[in-house]
Image (cartoon, grey):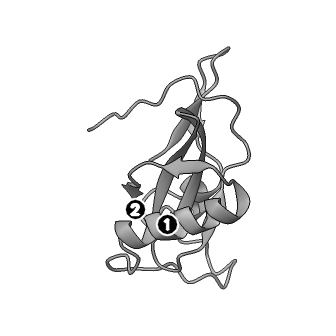
Amino acid sequence: MEVLVNKNMGVVFPEYGPAMMWNTQYGMMSRDMGGMTEYQQPSGPMTVSATQAAAIAHQWLAQNKPGTTIEVPDQFPGYYTIHFQQNGTMAGMLSVNGYTGQAWYHTWHGKAIRVLEVSE
C-alpha cells in the first residue's frame, strides 16, 4: 500500500490515484460496492510483468518527460509504481496497471523528501 504523510501535521493517508483505484487488495475497488458500478475488478495474477511495466513507463516518459531515467518498478496488488529521475534526482512517479498496461502519471506530489519502504 502506498501512503502519503503530511509533513506539517503527521497525518497518514492512502495515496491518491492508483493506490486507491487499482490496488486490488486495499483500494476502493477491492470492496463490494453493492452494484453501484459496472467496474469489473481484475483477479488472478497480473498479466503485465515488471519488465513490461518498465518498458511502458520508459515509453510514456520518453514522450512526456524527455531526459528522465526510471528506477526498478515497485509491485503492488494490481499495479506497479516507478520512480523516475532527472539529473540524478528523483523527479516523479508513474504507475502502470498490472492488467491493462495503462500509465498514470502522479501529478499531486510536490518535491520528494523521503521514500520509506516498510514491511509487515
Residue 118 in percent (x, y) is at 33, 33
Q: Position of residue 12 (x, y in %)?
A: 56, 29
Numbered tag placed on residue 83 in the rendering: none
Q: Residues within 10 Å of mark 1 (few under 14, many from 20)?
A: some
The image position of residue 24, as x and y in percent, is 45, 66
Q: Quadrant of residue 94?
A: bottom right
Q: Is residue 110 visible?
A: yes
- Relative to 98, residue 111 above or below: above
Residue pictured at 59% horizontal, 48% vertical = 68
Give residue 30's mark: 1
Q: Is residue 16 above or below residue 77?
A: above
Tell me the residue at 53%/76% (across/down).
101
Crowd rating for badge 2 (residues with CA inside 10 Å; few <14, some 14–19, many 20+): some
Q: Position of residue 120 (x, y in %)?
A: 26, 38
Answer yes or no: is residue 24 visible. no
At 65% from the left and 55% from the top, the residue drawn is 17
106 displayed left or right of 73? right
Query: Label 1 sits on what residue type?
Result: Ser
For mark 2, what is the residue? Answer: 77
Q: Are marks 1 and 2 in contact (CB under 8 Å)?
A: yes
| Residue in the image at 64% along x and 24% along y | 6
Of the residues tagged 1 and 2, which is closer to the observer?
2
Furthest-top residue in this view: 8
In the foreground, 119 or 82: 82
Q: Is residue 56 left or right of residue 36?
A: left
* Position above or below: 90 against 76: above
